[in-house]
Amino acid sequence: MKKKEPFLSEFSNLLFFWFIAVTYFFIFRLIFILIYNSDINSELSTSNYINGLFMGFRYDNISIAYFLLIPLISALTLIPLKKVDIAIKIRKIFQIICSVVSVIISIVTINYYSEYKDQFNHFIFMGLYDDKIAVFKTIITDFNPFLNGIILFILIFLFIRIFAYYENKNKIYSFLNSYQFKYKSFIVKFLAITLYVGCFRASYGDYPVRRHYAAVTPDHFINKTIINPIKALEYAIIDFREINKVDKQNPFGKLPKHVQENYESINNFIRKQKSSLITLSDTPDQIFLIIMESYDSWALSDKYSDLKLTLELKKIKEKGVDFTNFLPASYSTFNSLGSIITSIPYCGVNMSKIGANKKFSTSIFSQFKELGYETNYFYGGYLSWQNLQNFIKKQGADNIYGAPDSSEEKVIWGIIDEYLFDLVLKKVDKTKKSLNIILSTSHHSPYEVDVYKKGFFYKNKQDLPLKYQKIYNQKNTSLRDLGHLWYSDKSLGNFVRKAEKKYSNSLFAITGDHFGRKFINTNPTLYESSSVPFILYGNTVKKLPKKIETPGSHKDISATLIDIVAPNNFSYQSFGNSMFNASTENIGYAYQKIVTKDLIKTYSKNYGEKTFYFERKIKKNINYKEKLDSVMSLSWQYIIKGNKIK
């Protein structure tokens, strides 16, 4: 028999290694679903299951790539050096490692799910702080280690026997070797590298598989089975490190002296009562708090009005209440969302995991339920993003909806804005009082909406009004990017028109999550690169002033809405203040920024302090940085240490 070509032979064995591993995880996922099939809560179509299994297959590829990397590198480097036996031994070692790790981790995760209703998460490490003897006894009592041990031994034995049996089989090699062509050796090596890259990324497109892609079906349980258990453990380690990386000492310094001396707890300090003198024509039945992705204030200003990018919100603003000095809590979507929902200022600590385990008394959902409102949350993306479903559920929302709850076509981030708003109109009951928080997605890269099909009108720079052509920098922001701002605004306007007809006694509160990082040139002012809108609109607020200069940020939204709907003397907890209350200190606080009626300041460890004055420079002997650090120190203390002051 003709001697085998060494690399092609080893490449054939690596392909078989990949096939066996990916088949194992496919079978594991089916068994997982069968064992816990009673946890399936949604009516799923065949296509839903296919989507889930295919996405799981993509995650499996990433995990298997970890075990293939060193064997592939060994084959590419050692075989040309005539060290074929060493390359083979290395591959065999990793086949055993993969077999042992895959079997152990899949058995453990099936048992872990029975207790925690999840694959591995950062809770798995909480046992480090538990009574070790108690943990051991629990395992012995509840998880049948004898049966699990037998299954583990059998599966590892089968794995190793399969690899050994097929080690010298020639089917894959013979098939590959049957093709003869020029530069075959080079092309086979190039093919091996290309296949590995696709395996490691689980994609040949612009984006590799990301964590939030897991929620591709309407069913929460099926989505939990999609992430491979090896990847689930990897994410658990990342989450655990994130939660525990914070310093033991408050990074913003001690809590304010007057708080330490006069209050027994932080909850006591942040307790408030409705006390504003605002007068409404009626208390709204349905409240829609709409958080628009990357929707900032600059395009709403008169300076840029002729661009006609935000005509819809501009019309709403002219009829509603416009809070002109308003900042987002942070630079990113979830951190701003977390502040809106909890009223806790973002202080650099991500609450997606912490808030999934700890319910804050400041939660907007809990306080509106106390006021008699059903609470709903709508997101245009997948609820696995940033642990969103668990976070929202823990903070008290009655109903949670994401992209899989819509039958419309999905894009990378989920459903486009118009479909999200259609879902809201479909789900919100006009016979019930409700608070509905909505987070959009479309104004976000990779900007997948066909905005020209939707009616966008700028196809080249020359289409812009002449005064903007002179300052427009297409390298910084493409016309397609601007088109997505226009599209989001258009979808928002269409929704408000439909909703105010369907819900006659409704209130709309509209803001952006953060500066969109897109501007018509590379030199926005600090205001243009910081501010987001906060606008109230509806019949219930039509008698209120059209323009309010009280400074504020996302943490103040819940207090402002409570001020609108709550009876006098209603008691609640919030880090924010009602923006109708002129007795506040007239400073809006955000992460590394403050805003007043006169200026915006930003503070950076890298770049120091920067100030933008709205009209003229007004020097005041106020240490804004000290005040900002006081707010941040309280926030950090509350999130990390809890309610205690000392």
Image (cartoon, rainbow, N blue to C red):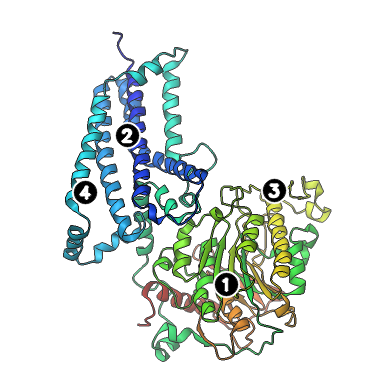
Compared across the picture, whether 144 is left or right of 432 comes to left
Give the Cα distance between marks 2 and 3: 43 Å
* Res 70 label: 2
* Res 148 label: 4
Q: Looking at the picture, tell me which residue is in the foreground, 302 or 22.
A: 22
Of pointers 3 and 1, the one earlier in the residue sequence: 3
* Res 480 label: 3
Q: Are marks 3 and 1 in contact (CB under 8 Å)?
A: no
* Res 624 label: none
Give the Cα distance between marks 2 and 4: 30 Å
Of pointers 2 and 1, the one earlier in the residue sequence: 2
Looking at the rendered structure, the kind of residue marked 4 is Asn
How far across and how far down the image is residue 165, in percent? 24, 25
Looking at the rendered structure, the kind of residue marked 3 is Arg
Does residue 620 appear in the picture of this structure?
no
Residue in view at x 44 percent, y 66 percent: 349
Of pointers 3 and 4, the one earlier in the residue sequence: 4
Of pointers 2 and 3, the one earlier in the residue sequence: 2
Density class for disc 2 (Cα within 10 Å; few <14, some 14-19, many ≥20) is some
Per the image, label 1 sits on a secondary structure element best described as helix
Q: Are marks 2 and 1 in contact (CB under 8 Å)?
A: no
